[in-house]
Amino acid sequence: MFFEYPEILWLEFLPLLLILHYIYLEWRQRAPHLRVSILTPWMESGRTAFSVLRHLPFALRILALSTIILAIARPRSSGQMERVDSEGIDIMLTMDVSTSMLARDFTPDRLSAAKDIAIEFIAQRPYDRIGIVVFAGESFTQCPMTTDRATLINLMKEVQTDLIEDGTAIGNGLATAVARMKDSDAKSRVVILLTDGVNNSGEITPQMAAQIAKTYGVRVYTIGVGAEGVAPYPVMTPWGVDIQKVKVEIDEELLRTIAEETGGKYFRATDNTKLMEIYSEINKMEKVRTTVDSFPVYKELFSRYAVIALAALLLEFLLRVFIFRRLP
């Protein structure tokens, strides 16, 4: 057995201090005295059970405090070992963060919907290494590949449209994602590229980026997001934000070519539900099983100490109320 937070065990000095304080108070209470002519009645009476048991409520309280401290220190055991199967996949989520992603044909907008659904996707892949690349007029790595789900999700939540220069550099975004995983030894390497526009900037063309991905064996799933025809888009005017209809332009042919060239697949998402279904389909398609080495299975032991503390406090309460009741 070991403790997750052993520094908390220093608090076990508190019960010791309380015991010393209790002993001191008992000694103080014995200080008053009374002179009598004969000691025979007191010598014959001896120590009664009540005089001994009156200390029991205090002992129960000390027991409760000690076990509560032990429970907070989070005792655990790791005697068991287990082998599990994991997915063994490296995934780079590559997301368009150009201002067009603020269009409101998704709820509440394209970018927010893409982030929320990507977070759900991350939660469903507990054993894979996942990273985040964002792109607009240029690209950068928001989060390198990691298995730290908490950090990954927090960094995904921080993705927004004003991080970098506006534009749509699909080639740069894909090339950055491939560069992050080209040296990976995972059995499967995947890029999920999501965009709502047409490539109009960047030093690397999408076709060149697709060839680079193919060279390194990276499979690319492309997702075009946007309603058919037109979509509501917030436009800043001198009188505030005005919602206007803008034409949805997605280079589906390019996205389809990138996917086919790398062995992936192209998807079109027109609303939140469709985007969620796409991620679910990718989740089912990318299953490469691999057995990882044994690792300890931790068992939490704090509950037994919590039960002991609760029982001690309850028993102390009953003793003070029904047996050792004091008159005011």
Image (cartoon, rainbow, N blue to C red):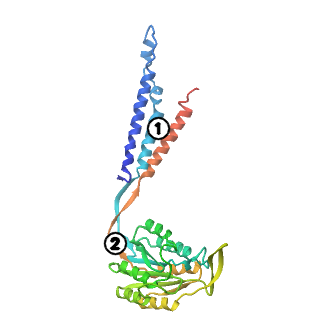
137 or 51, which is in the foreground? 137
Q: Position of residue 146 (x, y in %)?
A: 39, 70
Q: In this rendering, does residue 178 appear at all?
A: yes
Q: Amino acid at mark 1?
A: Arg
Distance CA(mark 1)–CA(mark 2): 47 Å
Q: Is residue 157 left or right of residue 107?
A: left
Which of the two residues, 206 or 72, is positioned nearer the viewer here?
Answer: 206
Q: Residue at x 44, y 81 (%)?
A: 173
Residue shown at 53% from the left, 30% from the top: 324
Secondary structure of the residue carrying numbered label 1: helix
Disc 2, SS? loop
Name the residue beneath numbered marker 2.
Answer: 292
Asked where in the image residue 180 lies, by quadrant, the reply is bottom left
* Residue kind at label 2, given as amino acid type: Val
Is 45 situated above or below 279? Answer: above
Total tally of numbered discs in the picture: 2
Q: Position of residue 253 (x, y in %)?
A: 51, 92
Residue 223: x percent and y percent?
A: 51, 83
Q: Is residue 131 visible?
A: no
Instruction: Point out the residue furthest to the right here.
Output: 239
| Name of the residue lying farthest toward the front | 238
Looking at the rendered image, the quarter that the C terminus falls into is top right
Residue at the image position 44 percent from the left and 87 percent from the top: 264
In the rendered structure, the answer to whether residue 75 lies left or right of residue 254 reads: left
Mark 1 nearby-residue class (10 Å; few <14, some 14–19, many ≥20): some
Q: Residues within 10 Å of mark 2 (few under 14, many from 20)?
A: some
- Given residues 127 and 313, the one toward you in this image is 127
Residue 162 vs residue 103: left or right?
Answer: left
Which residue position is annotated with label 1?
A: 61
Percent x, y of residue 90: 39, 77
Disc on the earlier residue, 1 or 2: 1
